[in-house]
Image (tube, rainbow, N blue to C red):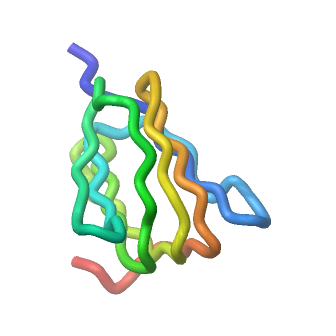
Amino acid sequence: MDNSFRVEIYTPKELFFDADAEYLKISGLDGEYGIMKNHVPTVIALREGGAEITKDGEKLRFILGGGYLEMKDNLAKIFVADCKKNEKAE
């Protein structure tokens, strides 16, 4: 059974990340959010901070500038001021 959904991360300059994922953990203005396949459609205001994407069992970590996330039809579109891969995370 396929438990994945699409995650796209956009910055003003580029499409920074585009892949299927099993889980997304992201920092909203009012706390942490966990997103999985078939999540209810939502828009979340994001604070500067971390995001963790689980893809094929591997955890990928990113540092995001503020922005927002739109989740609809198994597509999480994340629009942020800046994004970089967190190479220091375990």
Going by the picture, which residue comes out furthest to the right? 13
Left or right: 41 as drawn, with respect to 84: left
Going by the picture, which residue comes out furthest to the top? 1
Seen at 59% across and 66% down, the residue is: 80
Left or right: 29 as drawn, with respect to 81: left
Where on the picture, by quarter, is residue 55?
Answer: top left
Going by the picture, which residue comes out furthest to the bottom? 88
Seen at 34% across and 65% down, the residue is: 28
- Pinpoint residue 26: horizontal percent, then vertical percent: 32, 61
Which residue is more in the foreground, 54 or 7? 7
Q: Is residue 19 above or below residue 54?
A: above
Which residue is more in the foreground, 18 or 77? 77
Seen at 45% across and 46% down, the residue is: 43
Seen at 56% across and 72% down, the residue is: 83
Q: Is residue 86 above or below residue 26?
A: below
- Pinpoint residue 42: horizontal percent, then vertical percent: 39, 39
Where on the picture, by quarter, is residue 1?
Answer: top left
Q: Is residue 52 above or below residue 40?
A: below
- Pinpoint residue 44: horizontal percent, then vertical percent: 41, 53
- Pinpoint residue 50: horizontal percent, then vertical percent: 35, 74
Identify the image quadrant of the C terminus: bottom left
Q: Is residue 66 above or below residue 14?
A: below
Left or right: 29 as drawn, with respect to 14: left
